[in-house]
């Protein structure tokens, strides 16, 4: 019984941290009407600023204030430089831009602080005992700090002129503007408050665990789940849901294992989105299908179709339960699905060899060597791309393709004609998953070795980036965007020849930052991509 109570107490403390971050997310959503994916990186920014303040002064109070200031500054700067330009755009545009903002923040932190673990050097204190239950003093301090912060935030929202203006804009922006409320001032206050709250959540998380550039990103799925579970846009609900989710994750850990805590948060997120009427996952399914079967000597003529089949089988139930979601919610769900797939292949070592990966996958044209093999592989890849493009062109010009275009242009009109857009969307998702599965199979046979670390979310964002660069809805745009992105990524490897003083680890941060910056700029100034939107001539 004491062990269970200790898990509940630990879950309460973790849940309060999740609740703070979810509050920051829902504050932005309530007024700006988009899910800010940079919330996790605001957390990280606050944690590193607090580390610097603590190291300089030796005072945790000074460190916490430094974290709050850094988070508020990051929030206001992101609004002024990015999100103000995107006001009035579709919510998914702001979501993608926020991903780019997060990339850029993470890259800057990785460049200056490295990617090693850092900790707050606080004195070790014996745990307190209450009967047979052990309570960590730091956990209690974290919980009290989170509760005090929540009280201050709710006081600001309900007892100050700025808070009343924020709530007025959230309830009815047009009426608030007519009433004389200046939306611009409200947005400045909103982003400062949201950034500061997220930063404090990062400080508390850093005290409880360790500080890494990726720490906030890894918390993003639980934060999204808490915000949606509590009713996104509703601050009190977000906090309560964060606490419940933290407790649920902790008490479930002995049964499902530590690795599946994130998967549990994704399941909660998906279930709640369904009750409230990433391609890298399918890529990973295809790659591992090929690796498991191909490592036993099975021909590529067999592994390629099986990779497509298993990816499509994975996509079908996901589509059935999530395709009716709004586009930004669906993007979050698909990203969470990709992370769950990666967690599964990491944990189920009996099938996937876990973190060690699978080696010995037959390489394409393995009987050849050197330049001859490279040219043969290049020829095969070009041929596969041409076949895929030709197939897509035929589909686009078929009755099915015209129906998909009609759904994209005016879904309500399609419903009025008696058609079910959801069914067509599921078919498109399954078809895309099959292509992603084949791409994963090609990748596995090309590399000859795969591991879970090769299927991080960055790969999904690179696919999105290629589509945005080339032009959404255009087959030629996807090809052009992919080529340009790969030219940049591969070309940046030679930057060390120009800047030999930068290490390989730092160069990885530079590349991440440039990708994030490019995602921001394309979303802001060229959302239609280089090739423009698709329009039928």
Image (cartoon, rainbow, N blue to C red):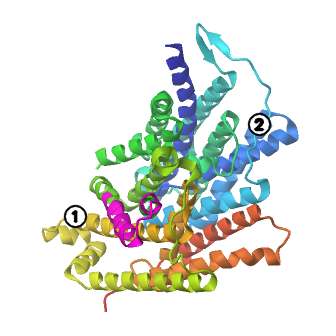
Outermost residue toward the top in this view: 131
Q: Is residue 475 rendered to the left or right of residue 50?
A: left
Task: Answer left or right for 472 relative to 5.
Answer: left
Q: Nearer the viewer, residue 14 or 25?
A: 14
From the image, tell me which residue sits under label 1: 423
Q: Give x and y (percent) for residue 199.
A: 65, 45
Residue at disc 1, secondary structure: helix
Front residue (pair 283, 413): 283
Q: Secondary structure at mark 2?
A: loop
> How dense is the environment of label 1, judged by Cα within 10 Å: few (below 14), some, or many (20 and up)?
some
Q: Is residue 496 left or right of residue 311?
A: right
- Give the residue at mark 2: 120
Image quarter in which the C terminus is found: bottom left
Disc on res. 13: none
Q: Give residue 364's position: percent from left, percent from top.
A: 50, 75
Q: Is residue 311 magenta?
A: yes
Q: Does residue 503 belong to the magenta stretch?
A: no
Asked if the residues shown at circle 2 and circle 1 are in contact, with their CB atoms under 8 angstroms apart, the answer is: no
| Residue 189 shows up from this direction | no
Could you say where residue 296 lies in the image, as x and y percent from the top left? Answer: 45, 60
The residue positioned 58% from the left and 77% from the top of the image is 485
Q: Which is nearer the N-term, disc 2 or disc 1? A: 2
Main secondary structure type of the part rendered in magenta = helix
Q: Is residue 272 visible?
A: yes
Question: For the magenta stretch, what is the residue range?
Answer: 290-313
Residue for point 70% across, 35% down: 207
Instruction: Give the percent coordinates (x, y) of residue 413.
Output: 20, 72
Name the residue located 56 percent from the left edge and 45 percent from the top edge. Answer: 219
Q: Is residue 306 above or below residue 221?
A: below
């Amino acid at each position: 019984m004491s062990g269970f109570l200790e898990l509940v107490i630990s879950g309460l403390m973790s849940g309060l941290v999740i609740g703070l971050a979810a509050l920051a997310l829902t504050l932005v959503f309530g007024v700006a009407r988009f899910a800010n994916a940079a919330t996790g990186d605001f957390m990280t920014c606050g944690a590193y600023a607090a580390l610097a303040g603590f190291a300089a002064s030796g005072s945790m109070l000074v460190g916490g204030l430094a974290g709050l200031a850094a988070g508020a500054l990051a929030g206001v700067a992101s609004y002024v430089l990015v999100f103000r330009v995107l006001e009035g755009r579709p919510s998914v545009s702001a979501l993608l831009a926020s991903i780019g903002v997060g990339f850029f923040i993470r890259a800057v932190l990785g460049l200056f602080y490295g990617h090693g673990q850092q900790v707050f050097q606080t004195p070790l204190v014996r745990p307190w005992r209450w009967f047979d239950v052990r309570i960590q003093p730091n956990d209690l301090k974290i919980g009290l700090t989170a509760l005090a912060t929540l009280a201050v935030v709710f006081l600001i929202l309900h007892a100050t002129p700025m808070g009343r203006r924020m709530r007025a804009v959230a309830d009815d922006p047009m009426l608030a503007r007519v009433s004389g409320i200046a939306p611009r001032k409200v947005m400045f206050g909103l982003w400062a408050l949201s950034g500061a709250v997220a930063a404090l959540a990062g400080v508390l998380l850093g005290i409880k665990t360790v500080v890494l550039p990726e720490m906030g990103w890894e918390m993003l799925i639980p934060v999204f789940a808490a915000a949606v579970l509590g009713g996104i846009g509703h601050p009190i609900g977000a906090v309560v849901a964060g606490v419940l989710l933290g407790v649920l994750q902790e008490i479930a850990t002995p049964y499902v294992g530590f690795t599946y805590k994130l998967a549990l948060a994704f399941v909660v997120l998906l279930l709640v989105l369904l009750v409230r009427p990433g391609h890298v996952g399918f890529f990973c399914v295809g790659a591992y299908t090929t690796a498991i079967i191909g490592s036993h000597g099975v021909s590529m003529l067999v592994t390629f179709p099986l990779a497509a089949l298993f990816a499509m089988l994975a996509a079908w139930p996901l589509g059935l339960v999530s395709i009716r979601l709004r586009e930004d919610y669906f993007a979050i769900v698909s990203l969470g699905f990709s992370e769950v797939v990666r967690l599964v292949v990491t944990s189920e070592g009996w099938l996937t060899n876990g973190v060690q990966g699978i080696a010995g996958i037959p390489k394409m044209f393995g009987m050849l060597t050197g330049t001859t093999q490279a040219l043969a592989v290049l020829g095969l890849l070009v041929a596969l791309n041409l076949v895929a493009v030709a197939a897509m062109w035929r589909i686009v010009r078929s009755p099915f393709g015209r129906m998909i275009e009609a759904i994209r242009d005016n879904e309500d009109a399609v419903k009025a004609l008696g058609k079910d857009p959801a069914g067509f969307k599921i078919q498109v998702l399954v078809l895309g998953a099959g292509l992603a599965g084949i791409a994963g199979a090609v990748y596995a046979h090309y590399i000859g070795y795969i591991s879970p670390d090769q299927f991080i979310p960055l790969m999904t964002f690179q696919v999105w980036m290629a589509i945005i660069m080339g032009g959404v809805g255009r087959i030629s745009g996807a090809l052009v965007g992919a080529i340009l992105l790969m030219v940049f990524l591969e070309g940046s490897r030679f930057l060390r020849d120009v800047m030999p003083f930068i290490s390989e680890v730092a160069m990885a941060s530079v590349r991440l930052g440039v990708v994030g910056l490019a995602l921001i700029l394309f979303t802001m100034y060229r959302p239609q991509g280089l090739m423009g939107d698709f329009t039928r001539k």
